[in-house]
Image (cartoon, grey):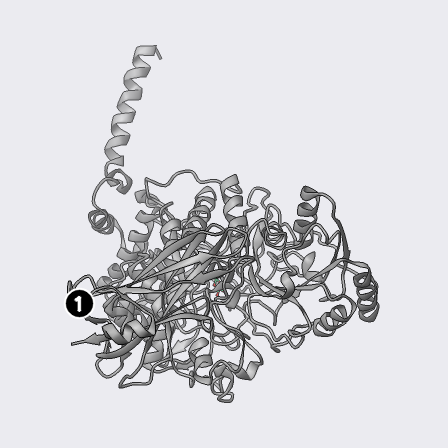
Amino acid sequence: MSNRLFLVFFSLCFFVSSLSLSAQVYLDADADLEARIEDALSRMTLREKVDMLHAQSKFSSPGVARLGIAGIWCTDGPHGIRPEVMWDEWNQAGWTNDSCTAFPALTCLAATWNTDLAHAYGVALGEEAVYRNKSVVLGPGVNIYRTPLNGRNFEYMGEDPYLSATMVVPYIKGLQSKGVAACVKHYALNNQEVNRHGYDVEVSDRALYEIYLPAFKAAVMEGKAWSIMGAYNLYKGQHACHNQYLLRDILRGEWGFDGAVISDWGGTHNTDEAVMNGLDLEYGTWTNGTTTNNREYDNYFLADPLLKGIAEGRYTEQQVDEKVRNVLRLIFRTSMNKNRGFGSMVSESHVRTAREVAAEGVVLLKNEGALLPISPKDQHILVVGENAIKMMTVGGGSSQLKVKYEVSPLQGIENKAQEKGGFEVMYERGYTSGEKIIQDNLDFGEKLDDPRTAAQMVSDAVKAAKQADIVIFVGGLNKKPHQDCEDSDRESYNLPYGQDELIKALAEANKRLVVVNVSGNAVAMPWVDKVPAIVQTWYSGTEGGNGLADVLFGDVNACGKLPFSFMKTLKDYPAHQYGEEAYPGVGSRLVYKEDIFVGYRYADKVNNKTTLFPFGHGLSYTTFDYGTAQITNPYRAEQKPVRTTARRMRKKGTPQMKRNESLFITIPITNTGYRDGKEVVQLYIADKKSSLPRPVKELKAFQKVMIKAGETKNVTFAITDDMLRFFDPDKHEWVSEIGDFEAIIGSSATDQRKVVKFQLQD
Ligand code: BGC
């Protein structure tokens, strides 16, 4: 063929193929999202539509190849991008290019109380997801911390609805800015793992709306999450994945959700409810979420049984269309989002973010005699404990990650000691948790065997402790079943593997003992009075050890705050005060008898007598002084700023606001120490008299501020009517009642620095 002829032939082919392509949906990419959805829908056969509503493999569901509509590729979540798994199995596929950055667990992120870091976390996670061609990250998780036994608390953001809501929104925005959907989980009332497929939660509307829903609501209404995952459990007799109240009435009806509802893996149980009650995408049916049981995807509830039901007139194509629209919206926002970049894995910025979160999440619980930070005098450092050397990204269930690397606490301390010079770091195991964890055939070849008996390990550790200048014990829980791990709850509130006895023995051997507890849950600390310094840290991922060492050596000033209360004993948690119906449930009944009094809301009721370390607590290596608060109502010219000393308040009268007004409280915070540091200034509101019982106070705002040594910064909070409201179950709405309130400003739920009275007027 001559060149000219070839060119004519080629142009003809191109013209013909673009004619046929113009029928394809992806050429309409510039059209308005809803127009694209309708266009795509109008070209699809019923079979293609139904295929789109259920999985085709463990983690993917199909698009329409014929029309050029891409499929959906999901990944866990929520702390990093899960390794590729086999098509039909949980086992990882053994790729060699899918190792990720493990970001710190969400408890750690919540403990930073830093919304900028939550955004950076989302962005970095999104970039890793894009690089791995994922459309949906199965996370974040925002189930409320109801009991310290819940094996999955480490994947969530603590006990307070406001803190969780505030931290989850920037995570979602960051993630979705990369064209990757967040799939907020587990909606809703999945607050324990025991019998997670079988319990039916009985909870008052007040507790539902005030405690268990706000973080989901914020994720949907403020974060604009593109998908949400139905939980395993039931509510009002229906599984959460196809629950009329949760999905139709609240999620779509009250919050206007326009994304896709995805089932948890194995959370779908029947076609009727799935069709009627708002489930869009069915995944993992025939599995319990942890074991593999392959069945044909055509047998899924939203597959052939749905087609059959349409043929028999029980369901309509309109019902299918409603779901397909939601799925197409998800696809156009993610897999076919033309603004998606190329992403990156384990980039410098991801590693930096992981380290910053790891360090800012470290909570200094106790620091008698300023034992920390480690000083040059602490030349001989002894590190004791298995968690100093154990990989913590392995195990725990679906959030397990295959990391490019993971810096252990021991490695982090050694790195830092070497960087600074003049230190000698020694290590003793002290205890063992037994066999290493291998989940989904992921094996990093960790060597954790130790031929010594438990007694020998303790005695070796104690002997070494006597010689050291400072002892850093790194223990806590791990990612094994019945520790911090999906599909089971803890069986005890105490530390496992004889650690309590070991800590006591170490405290006898060396007065300069630091206990670092690594966990996603509170633990009993029967040795609390014997140990001068206690640090809470978390499953902190790739850079965990470096982040911890940054704080232990003082390069980063401690600034994390607890996202949940540490109570003295298990019985001090309200969920454990009402017998088995309240936990772990009797048969399918699980009754949230403590109602709205979860965490500090309960602790306050008993004057914090049972609190070991309160919600919001965390020390710094510096000190902060809270000055005199000034309160103004700019809506009232005549109401002059009131400096809130008792005498002045008496003279000037109590500041007042109406529902459409705001009061502004400004408080100067001074760093009175010698180090720069960040303080989390917390605002709680107390309603002094109300028609329904209310918690003594509730967190309504916070700000994390960096203040240089000797410097003073003003922090201003606006008090608005929505901060004064409670959920009135009879009216089914949020109401505020006129009367007296207090704005309590403090450094934790119990460390109250200023109390400012004000009134809400009609
Ligand atoms: C978990 C989900 C997870 C899913 C997929 C389920 O067992 O509950 O959180 O996203 O598995 O791995």
Q: Secondary structure at mark 1?
A: loop
Query: At x 33% / y 57%, what residue is drawn?
Result: 225
Is residue 115 positioned above or below 719 on the image?
A: above
Query: Which quarter shows the C terminus?
Result: bottom left
Where on the picture, by quarter, is residue 201?
A: bottom left
Where on the picture, by quarter, is residue 487?
A: bottom right
Is residue 142 positioned above or below 61 on the image?
A: below
- Left or right of 324 on screen, residue 355: right
Query: At x 43% / y 55%, what residue is drawn?
Result: 114
- Residue 291 visible in image: yes
Residue topped by disc 1: 660
Is residue 696 positioned above or below 349 on the image?
A: below
Residue at the outermost bottom position? 579
Camera-nearest residue between 72 and 536: 536
Category of crowding for the residue at label 1, using alpha-carbon neighbours closer than 10 angstroms: few (below 14), some (14–19), many (at least 20): few
- Left or right of 343 on screen, residue 572: right
Query: At x 76% / y 56%, what residue is drawn?
Result: 427
> Is the residue marked 1 within 8 Å of ligand 1, measured from its CB?
no
Please name the amino acid that badge 1 sits on.
Asn
Residue 429 at x, y = what percent? 76, 61
